[in-house]
Image (cartoon, helix red, strand yellow):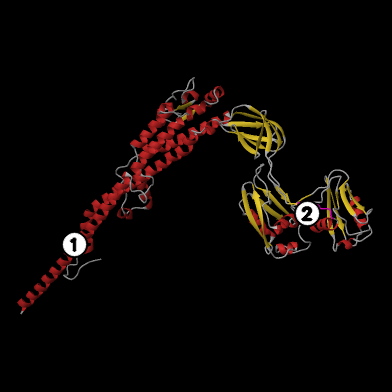
Amino acid sequence: MRTYGLSGSGMDVDQMVKDLMKARRASYDKMWQKKTQLEWKKADYNTMYNTLRDFRNTTAFNYKLQSTLMPKVVSSTVESVVSATANADAANVSHSINVTQLAEGAKLTSEGSISVPSASKENLSTQFGLATDTYDIVLKNGASTKTIKVDTSKSIYEFVSSINNSGIGIKASYDATLDRFFMNTTGAGASVGIDFSGTVDTDGLDFINKTLKLADVTTLSTSGQTSSETIGVTNGTDLLSSLGVTSNIVLKLTNGTTTQDITVKSTDSLDMLINNINSAGVNAQAIYDNSDTDNIKFTLKATSGTLSLAGSDQAAFNFLNDKLKLNISQTTPKPVGKDAQFNLDGVNLTQSSNSFTISGVTYQLKAQGSSNVVVSADNDKAIANVKAFIDAYNTTLEKVSSELNEQKYSDYMPLTSEQKADMKDSEITEWEKRSKSGMLRHDSILQDTLYTLRNDIASSVNGLSGKYTNMASIGITTGDYTEGGKLYLDETKLKTALEEDPDVVSKLFSTSGDSTAKQGVAVRFYETLKTSMDKIATVGGYSSTTDDDTESSLAKLISRYNTDLTNLDDRLEDIETRYYKQFDAMEVALSKLNQQSSWLSEQFST
């Protein structure tokens, strides 16, 4: 508080300056109130812009699409064979389909347990008894090729990750419980496959074929496989240790659906091995021929069907090939996927996937077999979609109409800080509610928007023939004029129209044309709303504030007000400073006058 006492006047200078400035600050407050009203108006414009944009981008846009206006219902006589959905392009007909083969991806699985028994799975070296080393395998799937590095110092799970992260559409996994390695393509069809044929690293091929047991193994027919040269035993009673068997090995024999494991011990004789094979119950026969002592041979064959040794451990293959000279090959696998094969309406077709779309119908094949797929118009959904359109329109109409008809309270200007200080919170709330009301009352842009939308609804679609050429003809009408164009639907009338012409809703909503008169209602709406939004953006911008808007008319006005307010505030500060200086000078003058008066009094008293 600047109360001066130098002169003895005792004047409250602060209050006097405040009173003097009050009248001058009234012009500042009026300017601030006008700017604030413009900011509120800009915010209301933004609300209307977003309301029209949402209606345009969702309802108006969706109802330009036939998928919204011509919904289909599809039934399959055998859902376990094929299910189907349909879009608006699908004809309302029945399709016959006979599935003879499902699409499949390529798969590979280890033929048996792959780890060394009881070995640690810390890394490939310990798990499989491999020397510490690195080698490359080349993996191909269709047109995609990737070189995968095998590092025996890393775990099998890291090897799995290197395949899964290769990006060629092949997924690998290792099941520790089954102790098997699995590979499959993520896609299906004849164009996909798992191909290692590009691998030139011998160790890499051995890792795939022998260590992971993914190799294709030669199957034996009834003619079987006979030693290519004499073997190293001369008598059936000789122990297998004489052929280099030092530990147990396992032969896995499979014929059809029957599989039998035969454990071969170093203490077994050749006759015991032959007897175990012949009595295994898998239609297998082993023969030892020593009739020619210079050319003793061993034969293994199927007595019927085919005999496979896939899944036998590597020591067993080494024994059969290196010792018994049977030359049973383990070739690098190259499995490929399968295309789906089916007959649709009398035409044989293939697809790389079990899910595909033909003539607007999306089929999902599930099993081999035959089914009829019936496509028909979904009139119930079409009616529900029309009701949803009307609800969205009426909601938008209500929001815009409410803004247009909102009461304007001209006497309720924005409150200044000084005014709020003298009011209760409830009084401030009620005041501001009224002062913000009616910013867009009778706004010409919004009035034109509603007028044009109502005209878009009421006008016929030129070029359509028959009795269904406008919204009223299918049961969409406006209510009393006091409701401002609110729409109502006669469902019975719409259902009748759909039964007579299943495309009627599409024609009235989504027909395109070179003029508004030839366009469907949704197409008209889409253009009308864009025009209105552009007008609003020109006046009020795309946002509720001026933070990122400098081009709209309101933003420019608000900016000018801000500049004027800043300049006016500077001038008021100068005036206030001048008042204080004047009072300072007055106090100095009064002080001097008092001093002179005191001196004169002293002179006259002497």
- Residue 118 rendering spot, x and y as whole percentages: 78, 63
Q: Check residue 566 in the rendering and tell me which mark sits there, or answer none.
A: none
- Residue 270 falls in image quadrant: bottom right
In which quadrant will I find the C terminus? bottom left
Does residue 284 show up magenta in the picture?
Answer: no
Quick check: 243 above or below 43? below
SS type, badge 1: helix
From this viewpoint, is residue 32 visible? no
Query: What's the amino acid at mark 2?
Result: Gly
In which quadrant will I find the N terminus? bottom left
**Magenta residues (range):** 325-330
Q: Nearer the viewer, residue 211 or 103?
A: 211
Query: What's the amino acid at mark 1?
Result: Arg
Q: Is residue 267 left or right of residue 394?
A: right
- Residue 201 rendering spot, x and y as whole percentages: 68, 57
Per the model, the C-alpha gap separating discs 2 and 1 is 102 Å
- Between circles 2 and 1, the one closer to the viewer is 2
SS type, badge 2: loop
Q: Residue furthest bottom?
A: 606
Quick check: 586 above or below 536? below
Crowding at dot 1, Cα within 10 Å, few <14 / some 14-19 / many 20+, comes out as: few
Q: Main secondary structure of the magenta part?
A: loop
Q: Is residue 237 left or right of residue 511?
A: right
From this viewpoint, is residue 296 visible? yes
Crowding at dot 2, Cα within 10 Å, few <14 / some 14-19 / many 20+, comes out as: some
Query: Label 2: which residue?
Result: 112
Does residue 327 show up magenta in the picture?
Answer: yes
Q: Nearer the viewer, residue 369 or 421?
A: 369
Tell me which residue sits at (51%, 31%) in the image: 386
Q: Check residue 578 in the rendering and tell me which mark sits there, or answer none.
A: 1
- Which comes sooner in the sequence, label 2 or label 1? 2
